[in-house]
Image (cartoon, grey):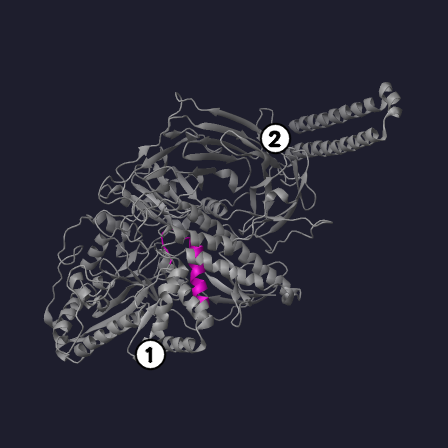
Amino acid sequence: MKLKKQVTVCGGAIFCVAVFSLYLMLDRVQHDPARRQSAGNFPRSQISVLQNRIEQLEQLLEENHQIISHIKDSVLELTDTGAISPSGHLPFRSANGSWVLPFDGRPTFLSVKPLDCQFALGRRSQTDLQMLDVYSLLNFDNVDGGVWKQGFEITYEPNEWDDEPLQVFVVPHSHNDPGWIKTFDKYYNDQTQHIFNNMVVKLAEDPRRKFIWSEISFFAKWWESADEHKQAAMRKLILSGQLEMVTGGWVMTDEANAHYFAMIDQLIEGHQWLEKNLGVIPRSGWAVDPFGHSATMPYLLKRANISSMLIQRVHYSIKKHFAATRSLEFMWRQAWDIESGTDMFCHMMPFYSYDVPHTCGPDPKICCQFDFKRLPGSRVNCPWKVPPRAITDANVAERAGVLLDQYRKKSKLFRSKVLLVPLGDDFRYDKALEWDQQYFNYQKLFDYMNSRPEMHVKAQFATLTDYFSAVYKAKGVAPGTRPPDYPVLSGDFFAYADREDHYWSGYYTSRPFYKNLDRVLESHLRGAEILYSLAVAHARRAGLEGRYPVSDYSLLTDARRNIGLFQHHDAITGTAKENVVIDYGNRFLNKSCADTIFFLFFRYLVLFNPVEQERLCVVTMLVNSARVRVLTEDGQTLPVQLSAQWVSAVEMSGEVYQVCLFVSICSSILNKGSLKTFTLVSSFRLLSWHASPDSFSPSLSFLHQSIRRKDDPQEVRVQIQFLTYGTRPSKDKSGAYLFLPDGNAKPYSQREAPIVRVVEGPLFAEVVAHYQHFQQTVRIHNVPGIDGLSLDITTMVDIRDQNNKELAMRLVTDIQSGDTFYTDLNGFQIQPRRYFQKLPLQANFYPMPTMAYIQDSQYRLTLHTAQALGVSSLASGQLEVILDRRLMQDDNRGLGQGLKDNKRTANRFRLLLERRSNSGKPVDSRPVSFPSLLSHMTSTILNHEVLALPVLPRKHGVPPMRTFAPLAGTLPCDFHLLNLRSIQSQVNESPGRKMCLSISGLFRGLDLQLLQPMSLSLMHSQPPLSNDSSINLEPMEISAYKLKLC
């Protein structure tokens, strides 16, 4: 009570002194005799100037009065309740010179109770194959296996199929990359459209012919240009089962760098197109070309009601081990699944590639002889120097026997007598001749085999689902159900190696500029989807549905499809040719982004919080005046911090300034604010110097040596080092796909000491260090809420003058993490990793789409990222991330180029230190881990920033804006609204009356008329629920619903 009185008296005294001083100043101006006598001689122009100055002074006095009132009120409220709303209250300096930001007394995040962690600590299901254990078991040697170089000799007894004949399903396919060596349009014009045109004719010639197709982006483009007769013929082929759409996504998505939002979105776009135009539902997944496989993909396909899937690019040592144990077909289960609700039947192709020489059996020299496109005279031949021979009556018996031998040997690797044999390769069947060559010759072989009972085989053309259905039937189980004695697996298949020590871990970072741009545009697309759906619903409720511009929906569709296209496994991976990458970028800029409105010319601003929880955060914008004041909709002044906009390391711009404002925004809300030119009420201090070479190690950033949480007396050592990798001096070198370093990383060094800049203000303090090839900014936010609980790190990288160099950032700590670290899969789940000394350095790098962490019994240190990059932990207490790669040569994987189109790229991170409870230690040895709720929210705000939408003023008056809060309340912090997507109309390119919502919530001002559970891609529906039903989600569950809001 005594302290309260002292603070009140002090605040009142400050107020009285300020008012009295201003009164004396005005009084002196009014009563100075000399001034009064000369006033009558002033010209009118000078009198006018004096009058304007007096008006300005009066305005200043009024503002100063308001500021003092705010300070007084703040002091009083601080002493009274300790809880102050940030709106309308300004930062001030304390007696020791540090900035104090008036705070919001409401909790900034929910406290975690012990019961909340029971899911993470609970019992896990037992699996037969856990990939971490498999890695520990294998030697990863590369023993010559004979004709199957990466395998072993396969033998069989001739009478093994006497009781149960071998069923052979030959599945013709053509893998079409939506951009790689050529652009999407170039591929379509040169090859893909001819595949479809031939398909319509050639499949119809014989009902026994089958084919599968995956990439809906290409199919949709052909469909739009095809006439009614071709469309009808294609629809007939699909409905009759001769042509199957497998997976049905817009692309065959990458599984390492892609975020699960984008993976789902491109899957929905493909499935919705199929439903609208063909009425077909994909039943099987097909992924022959992604460079490694994520455990997220089977979960998403399972939620989309796909029952079976196929994968191909898996480390050759793992394939060999699975083949030896006949585990190439398994039930893929999520690591957190206690029962079997996430099980997905998965087929792993056993050999090197998905081309014809590596699919009929273990001997590619023989299988190549049955790729009839390579017949003599073709532009494609067999590397083994033994060409195919056309099948005739004279040679059919011998040829059928040779082929059946390969079929039988391959079937010995599986647990059923049903065999899958893909027949295709990249952009195959673009010529009518190849359709005839493959189908005629294989049909002769099939007819011969099937007519000889002594061969005990039934061979046919088939679709992928034909094969899976036959396996289920042979094992006596329903589709998607675990057959007896088939193994259960959990884990993922990274990193991929196709031969020797050639690990495909370079593409985790290749072209980071585009990886970053993709993530930003995904967040913008999601925000646009949510706002559009709500706008349409409110327009419908107001009876204005017909007046709402439906043209906006076509813009959303274009944005979905272009971002979906970039999830292709040669796009977001950074493994396409330079002109193709430029084409992807142009699609982003032309279709996915609105025209840029520079903040220099606006006076009004709308802020959109795209997440479903309330946020207290700092929003940054650029203005053209150093005299800025920011007001809320109701006229209250927001705390702001003015900073310089730097032209170079030592030069500030005189025309552009950076303004950061502290705002509180409710969930999914649009807040209106205005900017006025005025004297800035906050300031900042700037220090800049050249670091001394004597006191500065060029390999070690001194930006922080340790971290200590305010509520924890113990410091944790955290150093940031920068290092470089080279590439091997001879033979195979690093490229867009491969990471083949020349040894351990070397400390980054430069001759000149870096220029260091320190900025301190009321909302944040930051240290910026300028090096020759990068600029690192470490910022601490002085704000309540999630923003203030982690370090904001931005590394601006520019290595365009380097040759065969890769820049890495390494965190060195005293956390006793041992050989274990954790990385996320697609931003959806966490996969424990282990550093293996038996593997080469490049094999220990893994994809990091959103986060990686290390931990011991006391602390967890998480590096959150706003773009996908490669990460590892090469020693206890370390995390290392590759920031950019510039490589001058191809790595012999078909691209034909190095990586020489680097751009100046900002890599954005959040570094979060958390103290662990003692109960967390037993989790370390388990094959599952989870981020904390705080970590989850930190990742969310990093990847979904508040969207600042500038509004151009009208010629007269204020734009008619008001705060828009669609949700009646915030959702719990462990719920995430994945999207609120308007579903297409079945008639035209306009939105339908229903929306997709990943979780249900209450919408202010709208009535819920339909609540219907759906599959993830909205193709399978369940009976509608009552409108007042509660939506309950299990941990890690993604659910979709159709809503009708009016």
Position of residue 676 relative to residue 203, above or below, is above
In-image side of 80 versus 644 (left or right): right
Q: Residue at x 61, y 42 (%)?
A: 600
What residue is disc 1 on? 204
At which x and y percent is residue 253? Answer: 38, 58
Which of the marked residues, 1 or 2, is nearer the chain's N terminus? Answer: 1
In-image side of 413 versus 563 (left or right): left
Residue 33 on the magenta segment: no
**Whether residue 1034 is visible:** no
Residue 270 on the magenta segment: yes
Return the mark for residue 683: 2
Q: Amino acid at mark 2?
A: Ser
Q: Residue at x 47, y 38 (%)?
A: 790
Q: Amino acid at mark 1?
A: Ala
**1013 and 450: which one is in front?**
450
At which x and y percent is residue 129? Answer: 26, 55
Badge 1: residue crowd in 10 Å (few <14, some 14–19, many ≥20):
some
Q: Residue at x 45, y 77 (%)?
A: 228
At which x and y percent is residue 801? Answer: 38, 37
Residues in magenta? 253-272
